[in-house]
Amino acid sequence: MGTRTLFDKVWTAHEVVPETADTPAVLYIDLHLIHEVTSPQAFSVLKSLDLRVRRPDKTLATMDHSTPTVTEQVFGKIPIKVDAAAKQVRQLESNAAEFGVELFDMLDARRGIVHVISPELGSTQPGMTIVCGDSHTSTHGAFGALAFGIGTTEVGHVFATQCLLQRKPKTFAVNIEGELRPGVTAKDLILHIIGRIGVSGGTGHVLEYRGSTIRALSMDERMTICNMSIEAGARAGMIAPDETTFEYLKDKPRAPQGAEWDAAVTRWRALCTDPGARFDASVDIDASTLEPMITYGTNPGMVMPLGGAIPQVSGNAVYDQALGYMGFHGGEVMLGKPIDVVFIGSCTNGRLEDLQAAASILKGRKVAPGVKLLIVPGSQQVKRDAENLGLAQIFKDAGADWRESGCSMCLGMNGDTVGAGQYSVSTSNRNFEGRQGVGARTLLVSPMTAAATAVRGKIADPRELL
Ligand code: SF4
């Protein structure tokens, strides 16, 4: 069979029918994650064709994108304020019941952002194929799974067949060596990578993140890296499973147990790129020289070191439009710019370690007057952990707004939005025009930079507050 990449191994193991020049491959899907926003239309198609969900046991539903984060609305003491969200929640409840799909509803202690709950349950496992009607499904690649977002029509295909028609992507090695300096995080690393290869740099490829830097990262950090693969245009991002992966998964409720665990780990150890295997593209990154990063434009590739100046570019309409929208100009320094809102959360940076990083800056400090700091845990489990560890109290003492879990201000579907013209420093993954609200201006950063900025009331370097 020759030498193979991690991606090749997982792809081949799931190929029901290989692709031909005229037809895509038929790929078997191990886990289908669904949520309230991209599933209703797919369920309607099933109903119209009188079809059932083929493998409800391999389908898991949660509510996250449009759900409220205000406690009274979540637990039904007052109605959900956004009508469209209330409707989507009710619809998923009825669809899940009708089709026998397991649902973590609003009251379920396991509810949260789809890409946070599946790993914390142990449902995400090495070597799996995982899909969801959400771009950031790439997150699960941190476990050595092949995981990618699909469209609503494809959600219907997976419901009906547990398979997907796919063209085989190419492979792209992202080789990263060196130790990250204090105050420089996985978020800064992935922002740097996107800046380096560009928002289309990974198009048609699956990225494999490799090297000593990646091996030294925790699972929460690896998930931050893989999460944003899609922002480099890639189909997916993957990291070979290792002892860190196995340690994370061991004893998770849905991970294999006992003898099955031992057999699974033996299988998972083979999930690595063979020495000498060929990639279609590659890039080498020296992580030891990186700085905290911040975006200045309206895509995640418009990114720069926090202490630098906005690049000066002439004759580029995209650049002009982006800077016009952001109210910036080339050559401006970002540090010290006043901001209005800080958001810490999302499937990129809403996990426990992200909240611990933010708390390390916020402890004993106050949010600057006039700044709104919204902190939204990625899941109800993360919320409980943060409360048990005293992080929530640190946030509240600092003057932050501490909420129930969900996507929240990452995309503002639930009413948690940034006002027109306001500057939002955010740990989420997309800074597109209007992403956090009509006219909102988003600057993507790490949780540490977000926390330091909230304290200072202007864009700040977290290393000054370590
Ligand atoms: S947090 Fe944002 S990116 Fe992640 S699943 Fe929710 S909406 Fe998508």
Image (cartoon, rainbow, N blue to C red):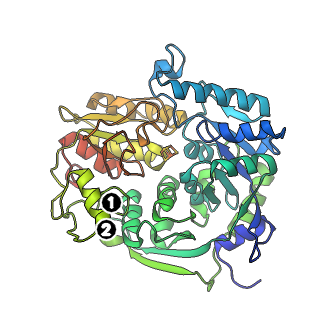
Crowding at mark 2 (Cα within 10 Å: few <14, some 14-19, many 20+): some
Instruction: Pick whichever of labels 1 and 2 is earlier in the sequence.
Output: 1
Residue at horizontal 44%, vertical 69%?
213
Q: Which residue is mark 2?
A: 290
Q: State the image coordinates of residue 167 (x, y, percent, origin top left).
A: 68, 69
Marks 1 and 2, Cα distance to the nearest angstrom? 7 Å
Q: Residue at x 47, y 29 (%)?
A: 404
* Residue farthest top in this picture: 77
Quadrant position of the N terminus in the picture: bottom right
Pointer 1 and pointer 2: residues touching (CB < 8 Å)? yes
Q: Residues within 10 Å of mark 1 (few under 14, many from 20)?
A: many
- Residue 265 versus residue 91: which sits nearer the camera? 91
In the structure shown, which secondary structural element does the residue marked by tag 2 occupy?
loop
Front-most of residues 222 and 320 = 320
Q: Residue at x 46, y 65 (%)?
A: 232
- Among the 4 quarters of the image, the one containing residue 49: top right
- Mark 2 residue type: Leu
Residue 238 placement (x, y as % from top left): 58, 65
Q: How many marks?
A: 2
Please say whether residue 121 is visible from this viewpoint. yes
Front position in the image: 159 or 178: 159
Q: Amino acid at mark 1?
A: Val
Q: Which residue is mark 1?
A: 184
Residue for point 73% across, 68% down: 24
Instruction: Please tell me whether mark 1 sits on a helix, a strand or a loop.
Output: loop
How far across and down, in percent of the image, does residue 241 sit? 62, 64
- Asked if 31 appears above or below 317 in the picture, the reply is above
Percent position (x, y) of residue 367? 23, 35
Q: In which image quadrant can residue 245 be found?
A: bottom right
The answer to whether residue 64 is left or right of residue 197 is: right
Could you say which disc has been placed on residue 193 in the image?
A: none
In the picture shown, does residue 246 fall above or below 269? above
